[in-house]
Image (cartoon, rainbow, N blue to C red):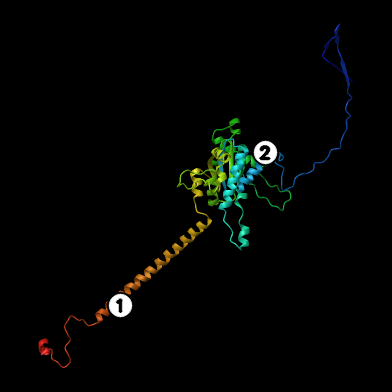
């Protein structure tokens, strides 16, 4: 097979004459050789307990979806912040000041108690602030809230466990057909309807989250003093003093804090606003709550004891008063008249006092 390709003509101007040239290129193509391969059998590349993903797991979106789902399921306290074009230097300064404040507020272990020192973890390593992809985070939130994977027996090797990227998880984030029919939505209008949670109202625009490993009011109060301090000398969450945290007043840190806005929080699966966040941060710590619980239990026991003793005490008071009355009645009455002596007649007159003196 011979293929001719005509190239465009070009005029070459010489000093004395112009010559029109036309060149042709010849390409000889050979038919490809047909090779037949034996039909290969399918090989199972995944574990029987880890089925293939509904979405390709190698994509970055899938990895972020898994990461966000795990974060939502394992984090009891999460602050939602809105950021506006913060620079890398501003983020670095805010993270540095937050870590320093948490280290200062962390409880110090008792000297000589190695077991207690091992249980205390550094809060600056467990409390993290990160920027999230709002769309992927919203999808992961639906899966974390509405998807409940079915528990299967581990004895069966063919049993599969549904995960966050499975088709079952994808379908759980959408309303049922029955609910859509009741709402009067059909066709294309019903195709794009998804379930929603109260936290989805806060996921608008650029979002960053501040996560805590546990609901500790003291750590939350320390973070609020750095990220969202309140103004006023008598405020509950004032900004640190310049003497205690000079790096907090650097221009990069202050410029970054002005671009952060506290929207709300997710506390144990419930969404609260700014007032609710500050209310949780103002609660006493774990030791304070334990002391309050001990006081409530002891006061209840003392009240019960006093109530039981009051009945017996009133009975004893009544019996004691009756005993005193009976003793008074048994004694002879002395009304200022002397009793006659033995051997004297009742009508005999006693000597006057003057006669006795004479």
Query: SS of the residue at dot 2?
Result: helix
Q: Which residue is mark 1?
A: 323
Residue situated in front as seen by the camera: 193 or 7: 7
Q: Residue furthest bottom?
A: 343
Q: Is residue 348 visible?
A: no
Q: CA distance from mark 1 to mark 2?
A: 91 Å
Estimate the x, y position of residue 12 in percent, counting from the top left: 84, 11
Residue situated in front as seen by the camera: 128 or 318: 128
Residue situated in front as seen by the camera: 10 or 270: 10
Q: Give the quarter of the image for residue 62.
A: top right
Q: Which residue is mark 2?
A: 61
Residue situated in front as seen by the camera: 165 or 235: 235
Estimate the x, y position of residue 137 in percent, counting from the top left: 61, 40
Estimate the x, y position of residue 136 in percent, counting from the top left: 63, 38
**Closer to viewer: mark 1 or mark 2:** 2
Which corner quadrant holds the C terminus? bottom left
Query: SS of the residue at dot 1?
Result: helix
Number of labels in the image equals 2
- In the rendered structure, the answer to whether residue 327 lies left or right of residue 213 reads left
- In the rendered structure, the answer to whether residue 34 lies left or right of residue 255 reads right
Residue drawn at the location 52% of the way across and 57% of the way down: 287
Q: Give the quarter of the image for residue 28.
A: top right
Around disc 1, counting alpha carbons within 10 Å, would you say few (fewer than 14), some (14 to 19), or many (20 or more)? few
Sequence-first tag of 1 and 2: 2
């Amino acid at each position: 097979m011979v293929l001719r390709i005509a190239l465009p003509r070009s005029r070459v101007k010489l000093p004395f004459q112009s010559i029109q040239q036309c060149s042709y290129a010849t390409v000889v193509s050979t038919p490809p050789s047909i090779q037949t391969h034996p039909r290969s059998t399918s090989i199972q590349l995944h574990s029987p307990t880890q089925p293939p993903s509904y979405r390709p797991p190698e994509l970055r979106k899938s990895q972020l979806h898994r990461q966000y789902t795990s974060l939502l399921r394992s984090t009891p306290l999460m602050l939602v912040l809105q950021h506006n074009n913060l620079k890398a230097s501003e983020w670095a300064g805010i993270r540095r000041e937050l870590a320093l404040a948490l280290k200062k507020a962390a409880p110090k272990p008792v000297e000589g108690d190695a077991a207690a020192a091992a249980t205390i973890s550094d809060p600056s390593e467990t409390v993290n602030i990160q920027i999230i992809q709002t769309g992927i985070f919203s999808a992961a939130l639906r899966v974390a809230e509405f998807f409940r994977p079915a528990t299967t027996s581990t004895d069966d090797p063919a049993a599969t466990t549904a995960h966050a990227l499975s088709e079952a998880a994808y379908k759980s984030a959408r309303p049922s057909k029955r609910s859509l029919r009741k709402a009067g939505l059909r066709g294309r209008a019903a195709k794009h309807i998804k379930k929603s949670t109260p936290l989805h109202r806060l996921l608008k625009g650029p979002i960053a989250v501040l996560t805590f490993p546990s609901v500790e009011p003291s750590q939350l109060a320390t973070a609020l003093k750095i990220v969202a301090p309140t103004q006023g000398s008598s405020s509950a969450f004032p900004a640190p003093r310049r003497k205690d945290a000079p790096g907090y007043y650097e221009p990069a840190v202050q410029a970054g804090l002005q671009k952060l806005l506290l929207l709300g929080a997710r506390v144990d699966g419930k969404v609260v606003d700014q007032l609710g966040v500050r209310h949780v941060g103002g609660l006493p710590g774990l030791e304070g709550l334990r002391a309050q619980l001990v006081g409530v239990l002891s006061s209840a026991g003392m009240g019960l004891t006093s109530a039981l003793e009051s009945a017996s005490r009133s009975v004893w008071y009544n019996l004691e008063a009756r005993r005193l009355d009976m003793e008074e009645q048994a004694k002879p009455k002395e009304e200022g008249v002397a009793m006659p002596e033995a051997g004297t007649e009742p009508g005999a007159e006693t000597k006057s006092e003057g006669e006795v003196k004479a």
